Image (spheres, grey):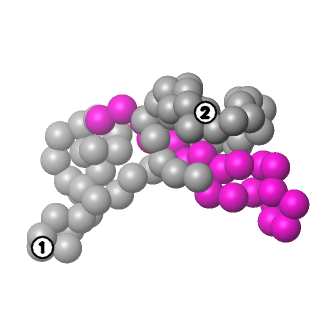
């Protein structure tokens, strides 16, 4: 699985940043985001952080295979 990123808008007046979503392609996310807006937002309007996705199997064991690109769990 490719890297995942949380996207935060930095232009809010009442909070430091606002969570917008999680994506594997920020540039494409921004393009799609702007398609529905009258006023275009820029890359600098957002803070993007790489995340570490941790998934659990049905037995409650965690599996980093999706996060770090290797097979199997831990």
The magenta region covers 1-19
Q: Does residue 51 appear anywhere in the picture?
A: no
**Which residue is depicted at the point 64% across and 38% down?**
37
Q: Which residue is mark 2?
A: 34
Q: Which numbered circle lies on residue 59?
A: 1
For this rendering, which residue is in front, 38 or 54?
38
Q: Where is residue 2 shown, x and y percent of the image?
A: 36, 32
Q: Where is residue 43 shown, x and y percent of the image?
A: 71, 30
**Which residue is depicted at the point 74% across and 35% down?**
39
Mark 1 Cα within 10 Å, few/some/many (few <14, many 20+)?
few
38 sits to left or right of 55: right
Q: Residue furthest right?
A: 13
Quadrant assignment for the C terminus: bottom left
For this rendering, which residue is in front, 18 or 53?
18
Q: Is residue 7 above or below residue 59?
A: above
Q: Is residue 66 magenta?
A: no
**Which residue is depicted at the point 87% across and 60% down?**
13
Find numbered disc 1 in the image and state the secondary structure of the residue it sits on: loop
Q: Is residue 18 magenta?
A: yes
């Amino acid at each position: 699985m490719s890297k995942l990123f949380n996207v935060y808008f930095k232009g809010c007046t009442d909070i430091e940043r606002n969570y917008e979503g999680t994506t594997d392609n920020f540039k494409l996310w921004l393009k799609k985001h702007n398609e529905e807006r009258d006023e275009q937002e820029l890359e600098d309007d957002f803070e993007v952080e790489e995340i570490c996705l941790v998934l659990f199997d049905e037995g409650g064991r965690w599996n980093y295979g999706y996060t770090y690109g290797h097979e199997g769990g831990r």
